[in-house]
Amino acid sequence: MDKKMKLQILIDQQQNAIEELNRSMGDFRDDADLDEGNTLDPEDFSHQTIAKESQLRLKQQLAKARADMELLQQYAATNCHTVETGALVQTNTDWFLIGISLGGYQSGDINLRCISADSPAFRELLGKKTQDSFSLGNNNYTILAIN
């Protein structure tokens, strides 16, 4: 399975997350847009405030999810030869996508994990090449390929 196919699984997961966030925003939009004339008691205003706050949080999550989707699409078209943002690193046991904070996935013998550009692990890996070794936690890895 090549890099584009591996990242397509993450892209599909991200698209599903975006669709779910959009659905949730619609639900909260309905609750937040309660007409004042239909409000019977102060508790209704309280629920409306909570719905608006939840809608704002969902809006922020949706913006991040869309930004992450753009990164994934950029990374799918990137070809790297050293560990850098956008690199897909195959090791003796796992795969690592460098530069994004997503959960990753496991499918058959592929365990793909994502490493954020803000993490200490990113700094540990940056610039490494094929056949270099590194440690994360108690695990030792050898880089077999970088895409």
Image (cartoon, rainbow, N blue to C red):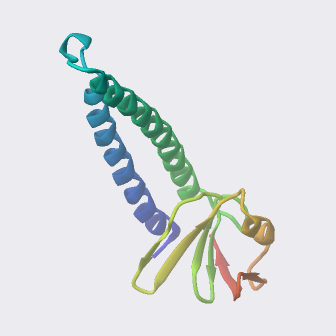
Residue 46 can be seen, yes or no: yes
Q: Residue at position x 41%, y 65% from top?
A: 9
Residue 82 can be seen, yes or no: no
Q: Residue furthest top?
A: 37
Image spot of residue 96 (x, y percent): 60, 72
Image spot of residue 47 (x, y percent): 32, 31
The image quadrant that residue 24 belongs to is top left
Q: Residue at position x 78%, y 83% from top?
A: 132
Instruction: Tell me if residue 106 comes above or below residue 23 in the rendering.
Output: below
Image spot of residue 32 (x, y percent): 32, 26
Give the side of residue 74 with respect to residue 4, left or right. Answer: right
Quadrant in which the C terminus is drawn: bottom right
Give the side of residue 100 with respect to residue 119, left or right. Answer: left
Quadrant in which the N terminus is drawn: bottom left
Q: Residue at position x 60%, y 57% from top?
A: 100
Q: Nearer the viewer, residue 42 or 3?
A: 42
Q: Nearer the viewer, residue 11 or 55?
A: 55
